[in-house]
Image (cartoon, rainbow, N blue to C red):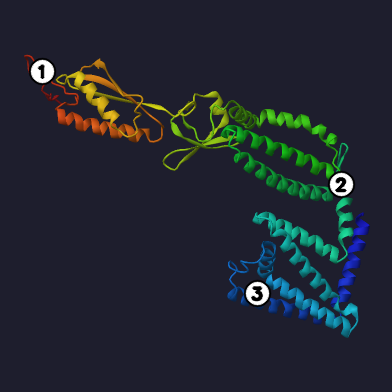
Amino acid sequence: MDLKDFMEFVQTTARSVGAEVSSPWFYLQFGLILAAAGIAYAAEAALRSRVDMTSLAMRWPLPLRHFVRVMLSSASTAVFTLLVIISRVVMYHATWPSRSYLLMVAAKLGFAWLVIRLVTSVLRNAFIVRLVSITAWFLAALSILGQLDTTIELLDSYAIVLGGLRLTPLLALKTGALLLLALWLTNIASNFAESRINATTDLTPSVQVLLAKIIRIGLLTVAIVIALGTVGIDLSALAVFSGAVGVGIGIGLQKIVANFISGIILLADKSVKPGDLVTIGDNTGRISAMKTRYISVAAGDGREFLVPNEDLVTQKVVNWTYTDKNTLVKIAFGTNYDADPRLVCTLAAETAAAHPRAQKGKPPSCILTEFAEAGMKFSLTFWIADPDGMDKVKSDVMLALWDAFKREGIRVPYPVREIRIRGGALPVETTVEVPN
């Protein structure tokens, strides 16, 4: 369709609309439509005030219950469509069929919206529901008015040719619609596969995450290829852009690609996995999730650190639960020289062994490490079964050790400085006056 044909189409449509508007039957139909809309709005308000949507039809079968709830949520559209259909039937038999054409169009549009609402009610994403509903209703309106084929020809008449690829507005709309549908189906399939994988107890958490990501990426690739092939896009025609895409990935997306590859490596070598307690730099916490670009480390204070996967591959990472969860707790303390070091070691070991989280199969150990200037220094070590709450365990043992030292008269040294002056006098600040 060229510009001349398009102008003729616009002129023909304008003449048809003008002839319809100039007829007195148009205003009668328009008034009936407005009256039906007002009655429908009042009916929906009355239903919402008298019907409990949450407990409605609880004992009915699920499909029927779902249908009733969708119809009640669209009660105004249903009542409007019913009233317009009744008005159309009455006018059709009372006068010429052409004098109720506007009522027929309004009834079809209302019925189309009801069907669309029922179909899209299975979707959960509000944006997708709104987009699909508006698009489907727009297509239905064009079809009802008999302008769908003309609109398709118009959208296909403007094209940009790139190599062997002919790009048109119609092709772009078809591609976008099919890609949305393919991505939605892919998301459903990948979520189902991920739930089945996570329910398998024979796989480790890292293998479960790796399989889920491989399946999601594979399904996404297949969906995009099928969608592009369905609309008639020859993928070989896009080969001319592959070089530019490769350069873009190499220059602008190198960090993203590095994090993606690092994430695959982490999942494959199982160096970290969800649930591990790790220390990365100054941050310590449990890995709550492993994503394509980063891992989420949940600290004990409610914060979550998002660490890029590349940092875990290239930097030092302390994994407290890599092979097992047994953790050695170390406590350094000191006493004065009046204390018996053997008694100090005995008290420290007994105090640590009395803690409920200390492992009984591995007895605590206390050694004298240094004769320092202010006193003797000791190192107490004992094992706990899990690193969670290690700081709390250290605090409990140190408080119990303090109580034991108090009972035995053992003092903890603190630095004391004495200044002795032999002969002479302390320097005294003097003031010297300078004559003017």
* Amino acid at dot 1: Arg
Are the two marked residues, 1 and 2, in contact with CB atoms closer than 8 angstroms? no
Q: Which of marks 1 and 3 is nearer the N terminus?
A: 3
Percent coordinates x, y for residue 77 in the rendering: 72, 71
Percent coordinates x, y for residue 283 in the rendering: 45, 33
Q: Quadrant of residue 22?
A: bottom right
Q: Give the residue number, with chain letter if any, for mark 1.
A: 420
Q: Most extreme residue toward the front, as rendered?
A: 361
Nearer-the-camera pick, 208 or 1? 208
Nearer-the-camera pick, 425 or 251? 251
Q: In which quarter of the image is residue 17?
A: bottom right
Q: Can residue 372 be seen in this view?
A: yes
Residue found at x 63% / y 68%? 57
Q: Which mark is residue 44?
A: 3
* Amino acid at dot 3: Glu
Q: Earlier in the sequence, mark 1 or mark 2?
A: 2
How much space separates mark 3 and mark 2, taking CA atoms?
47 Å
Q: Give the residue number, with chain letter if any, for mark 2.
A: 159
Are the two marked residues, 1 and 3, in contact with CB atoms closer than 8 angstroms? no
